[in-house]
Image: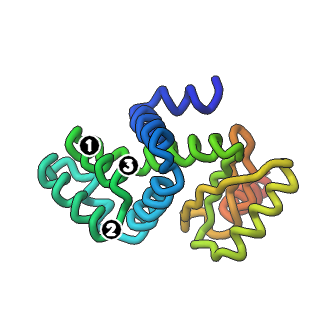
Amino acid sequence: MDQSSGIQASLAGRYALALFELAREEKKIDAVAGSLATLKAALAESDDFRALIASPLVGREAQGRSAAAVAESLKLDPLTRNFIGVLAGNGRLSKLPDVIRSFNLLAARHRGELTAEITSARPLDAGQVDAIKQNLRTRMGRDIAVDLNVDPAILGGLVVKIGSQMIDSSIRTKLNSLAHAMKG
């Protein structure tokens, strides 16, 4: 099963595919990708926003109003604003992080890029991201789009996933390996 059929199989993937198809028809893939990156950053930074999209106690109407206010304050493009409203109206706003991830995979494939999911213990600066992209481009022989995630539990280092390949240089994994070797 290739990546696109895996994307289409999930609910979030179907929403992402619908958004991608609309963005492609309207020649707004980059605008939507930019708005989704803004949303992803807002989700990473705001506990309140994460709670809003995840809470089953917040009704669809309230989620819709709140999502519209967030979209307005973040200055999202009109297509993404409408899409967020559809997610909220269908009670699927909790799927937003998965939709963003799936849309980014579709957009990268459309541009002829591979996508690397990079997890670090703390946010990476632009220079670090560029160095990683260059290293991966040399290693893979293709342009690489990156999906950055932060997980303090890995303690340090990086976990890089490209398709079915994984490079795990996290300190957590190294400590677990050392502990396993010591039990021996």
Q: Which of disc 1 and disc 3 is earlier in sequence?
A: 1
Residue nearest the observer in this picture, 2 or 30:
30
Identify whether 29 is placed above or below 70. Answer: above
Q: Seen in the image, is 116 located left or right of residue 152?
A: right
Residue nearest the observer in this picture, 177 or 129:
129
Relative image position of residue 50 (x, y in whole percent): 32, 60
Question: Which amino acid lies under the numbered mark 1 shown in the image of this protein?
Answer: Val
Using the image, tell me which numbered label, if any, was put on residue 86. 1
Residue depicted at x 49% and y 29%: 8
- Other-residue count near label 1 (Cα within 10 Å), few / some / many at <14 / 14–19 / ≥20: some
Give the residue number, with chain letter if any, for mark 2: 47
Q: Seen in the image, is 6 located left or right of residue 79?
A: right
Question: Which amino acid lies under the numbered mark 3 shown in the image of this protein?
Answer: Leu
Report helix, strand or loop for mark 1.
Answer: helix
The quarter holding residue 99 reads top left
Residue nearest the observer in this picture, 123 or 68:
68
Residue depicted at x 86% and y 52%: 139
For the N terminus, give its image quadrant. top right
Report helix, strand or loop for mark 3.
Answer: helix
Identify whether 58 is placed above or below 38. Answer: above
Q: How is this picture coloured?
A: rainbow
Give the residue number, with chain letter if any, for mark 3: 96
Report helix, strand or loop for mark 2.
Answer: helix
Q: Which of disc 1 and disc 2 is earlier in sequence?
A: 2
Query: Mark 2 and 1 residues: CB-CB less than 8 Å, in contact?
Result: no
Question: Which amino acid lies under the numbered mark 2 shown in the image of this protein?
Answer: Asp
Q: Single out the residue that lies furthest toward the front.
A: 26
Tally of numbered tags: 3
Relative image position of residue 33 (x, y in whole percent): 50, 54
Residue depicted at x 76% and y 52%: 143
Task: Calculate the distance from the C-alpha at mark 3 to the C-alpha at mark 1.
Answer: 11 Å
